Image (cartoon, grey):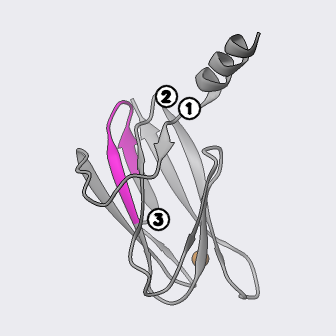
Amino acid sequence: MRIRYSATLLLALPFVVAMVPAFASPTRAIDVTLTRSVISPGQIVVHVGERVRVNVTSADGAHRFQVKGLRLDRRILSGGGAVTFELQPTDPGMFEIECLDDGAVGGSIRAQLVVKK
Ligand SMILES: [Cu+2]
């Protein structure tokens, strides 16, 4: 029963998300920059089966970077270098990216991760 449960969990995940060492070299790198007012780019487009490495940096302070539905939640520190994660989508879809500023007043900043066939 334990094995069946694990397999179901794996199938339910739309993505494989993992921290990777800086020296890994996947197919395509995407640089994302965070500020208090914008996530740049505002839309990240990837394709099913494509292997991408996303490098997230902050231009103006600490941020909390989340991709809804992917269990991706990272703290991005100012001047701390890029926080990198790798993904390889298995299904098309659209995922909301939300960025919260540490200690900031007001709402979060949003962007989209779009997976095309
Ligand atoms: Cu932010």
Q: Pointer 1: what residue?
A: 14
Give the amino acid at mark 1: Pro
Q: Is residue 59 above or below residue 90?
A: below
Q: Is residue 48 above or below residue 19?
A: above
In the rendered structure, the answer to whether residue 93 lies left or right of residue 55 reads: right
Q: Closer to the camera, 100 or 4? A: 4
- How far across and down, in percent of the image, does residue 62 sit? 58, 83
Ligand 1 image-quadrant field: bottom right
- How far across and down, in percent of the image, does residue 80 sit? 44, 82
Quadrant location of the N terminus? top right
Give the amino acid at mark 3: Gly
What's the mark number on residue 91?
2
Quadrant location of the C terminus? top left
What's the mark number on residue 5?
none
Q: Closer to the camera, 67 or 74? A: 74
Mark 2 vs 3, N-terminal side = 3
Q: Does the magenta portion include 6? A: no
Tell me whether circle 2 and circle 1 mark residues in contact (CB < 8 Å): yes
Secondary structure under the numbered disc 3 in the rendered image: loop
| Residue extent of the magenta highlight | 45-55
Q: Pointer 3: what residue?
A: 42
Give the amino acid at mark 2: Asp
Mark 2 vs 1, N-terminal side = 1
* Residue in view at x 67 percent, y 21 percent: 6
Which is more foreground, mark 1 or mark 3?
1
